[in-house]
Amino acid sequence: MQVGTLEVKPGMKTRGFLETPGYANALKARVPVLIAAGEKPGPTLSVVTGQHGRELNGMEAVRRVFDQLEPATMSGTFLAVPVANPLAVRLRQQDFSDELARYLSTCRNTNMNRVWPGNAEGNVIEQLAYTIWNGIVAQADCAVDLHGWTDLSLGLVWADERERELARVFGYGIYMVSQYAGRHNHNLDTTCYDNGIPSVTAELPPQNVVHEDGICMGVRGLTNLLIHLGIVEGTVEIPEDQVYIMSDHVEYQLQAECEGLLVPVLKKGDMVAEGDLIAQIVSLETMEVAQEVRSPAQGLLYNVGFLRMEALAHSSILFGGETVALVKEVLKA
Ligand SMILES: [Zn+2]
């Protein structure tokens, strides 16, 4: 197996770089690569993390897993790109060069997870995707894409229905069975699907800061996948009370009826029954409870808090009509 200029040989554990083919946006970029190749043959697992510059837990999860791998006991190969978008990461922003572009229809979107499989002659982000796709992901038998949305929502992992077992064994409390056929939206996961590579995508909240909760979700997921694929030995760990949702599951969006301070009563991940008090909205004028937000049905409290432009501007100050919480109907895995 060849990774850039490096010939990967059995038993090798090393670090290297992949470089973009040329200059674009006046930049030529390089991405770090971590490689652990088993002495015995087996499948190749690729891991991409850090497409978005505020999503950092996957990087540390990859580092911890890589540190523990021993090629002498592995059957197959671990190929990881821990900092896929080194420009956005250094900006501390989701995208390079302007993370607000994704919210403005008048701007060209520079979201890395909309340009796969990249373009050798495109802008620097398209060239990075091209480099990672051809150098790493296209060689994989299974691909992982690690993200991290805001802490207001529960971590979630998903895969196409064809590969739902990958989402299940990633070992989260909740996973989603999705449908990628015909999407062609240039996400990494749907591009994998179009090229016949099974993939799983996981969100490891929170954003902006490294947090042990998100790191541990990533370490368990990657370790479970390595075991599931037979690359390392061990036992897959899955929570006993694991639940799943289909991509078209029933979701209740609970809305604020007035302005106020949102005070959560329950937390994300709690199972709720119809009528359960989820949060209170406190009047900013009288400091009395102006609204009790109650669950309309039995389900999983997936999110509490108002998501405005993801992590860029979330706030507990709400106005009427804004979404306070999400409750999802879930199925027992
Ligand atoms: Zn992301």
Image (tube, rainbow, N blue to C red):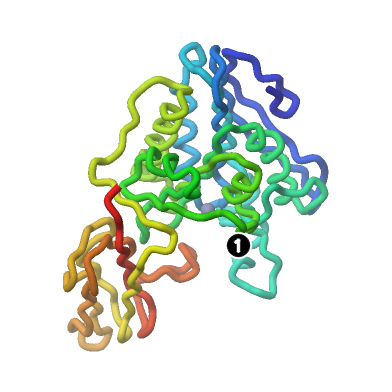
Residue 90: tell me if it is visible: no
- Where 18 falls versus 108 (above or below)? above
Q: Is residue 65 left or right of residue 77?
A: left
Callout 1: few (<14), some (14-19), or many (20+) C-alpha neighbours within 10 Å? many
Q: Residue at x 65, y 48 (%)?
A: 87
Q: Residue at x 55, y 45 (%)?
A: 50
Q: Is residue 333 left or right of residue 191?
A: left
Mark 1: C-beta under 8 Å from nearest atom of ligand 1: no
**Residue 257 coordinates in the image, percent (x, y):** 30, 85
Name the foreground residue: 48 vs 194. Answer: 194
Q: Secondary structure at mark 1?
A: helix
- Where 228 falls versus 218 (above or below)? above
Q: Is residue 252 left or right of residue 31?
A: left
**Residue 258 coordinates in the image, percent (x, y):** 31, 86
Q: How many marks?
A: 1
**Residue 89 coordinates in the image, percent (x, y):** 58, 48
The quarter holding residue 304 reads bottom left
| Residue corresponding to mark 1 | 99
Classify the position of the N terminus by image quarter.
top right
Q: Residue at x 34, y 52 (%)?
A: 244
Name the foreground residue: 261 vs 175. Answer: 175
Residue 302: tell me if it is visible: yes
Q: Residue at x 40, y 35 (%)?
A: 219
Amino acid type at circle 1 is Glu
**Residue 314 coordinates in the image, percent (x, y):** 42, 68
